Amino acid sequence: MRSFLGTSVAKKIVMALAGLFLIIFLLVHLTINLFLLSDDPNPFNNAANFMAANPIIKAFELVLFAGFLIHITWGVILQIQNWLARPKKYIKHHSSQTSFFSKYMIYLGVIIFIFLIIHFVNFYFVKLGWVEGDPENFYDMAHKLFKIPVYSIIYLICFLFLAFHLHHAFQSAFQTIGLNHPKYTPTIKLIGTLYSIIVPLGFAIIPVIIYFFK
């Protein structure tokens, strides 16, 4: 058992499960963020305060951070192992949508990780008291940030990269854990494609609406 856990197959499975967990979290996060489009700040602030004060949510945060850490760490390790296993570039390149996303997966992940750091500084670190801000009014903080053109543009670009990342990651995760069959793989691919479009688009429309209409 211990020898299996140290294999690349085990690492891929763990990374896939962590990735699927994060995919579910994104839906929850988007649901809360959509309250930012309301003219009433209370729904978003109440949700943010509930997540900050509820002990169950605090425990869930540890699981979430563990998911991020595992997914990122194993992703980097596996990519380095792939590079070491293939010191020479292939002479022939077979172009396909899957190979394109797979090839640049690590770079997309790094960009998303940088965005996460920015996001933590602007919100989570404020909640912890490490950065100046009002943890009781994240609604106002978010609206002020999205009124800054550079911040909104960076936000939109990062979610564009996230869409590419999710497009490959969704179906790749199911394939890694063994759910790969001609009967239901096309359905998984369809759901993955829709998810990778709808969820990032949902996040992206928030700064656009706030910047131009709020």
Image (cartoon, helix red, strand yellow):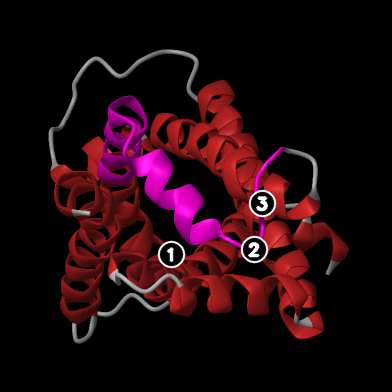
Q: Position of residue 170 (x, y in %)?
A: 35, 64
Can residue 177 be seen by looking at this rendering?
no
Location of the N terminus (image quadrant) = bottom right
Can residue 126 be seen by looking at this rendering?
yes
Q: Does residue 145 show up magenta in the picture?
A: yes
* Mark 3 vs 2, N-terminal side: 3
Magenta stretch, main secondary structure, is helix
Q: Which mark is residue 16?
A: none
The kind of secondary structure element at disc 2 is loop
The amino acid on which the numbered mark 2 sits, given as a three-letter code, is Glu
Q: Position of residue 114 (x, y in %)?
A: 53, 32
**Few, some or many C-alpha atoms within 10 Å of disc 1 (few <14, some 14-19, many ≥20)?**
many
Spatial CA distance of label 2 from label 1 is: 37 Å
Q: Is residue 170 above or below residue 90?
A: below
The amino acid on which the numbered mark 3 sits, given as a three-letter code, is Tyr
**Few, some or many C-alpha atoms within 10 Å of disc 2 (few <14, some 14-19, many ≥20)?**
some
* Mark 2 vs 1, N-terminal side: 2
Along the viewing direction, whichever of 45 and 1 lies nearer the viewer? 45
Q: Is residue 127 left or right of residue 122?
A: right
Along the viewing direction, whichever of 85 and 39 lies nearer the viewer? 39
- Residue at numbered disc 1: 173
- The number of callouts visible is 3
Q: Is residue 137 left or right of residue 128?
A: left
- Residue at numbered disc 3: 124
- Residue at numbered disc 2: 136
Of tags 3 and 2, the one toward the viewer is: 2
Q: Which residues are magenta?
A: 132-160
Residue that appears at 16% across and 76% down = 186
Q: Position of residue 200 (x, y in %)?
A: 27, 57
Q: Is residue 160 left or right of residue 142?
A: left
The kind of secondary structure element at disc 3 is helix
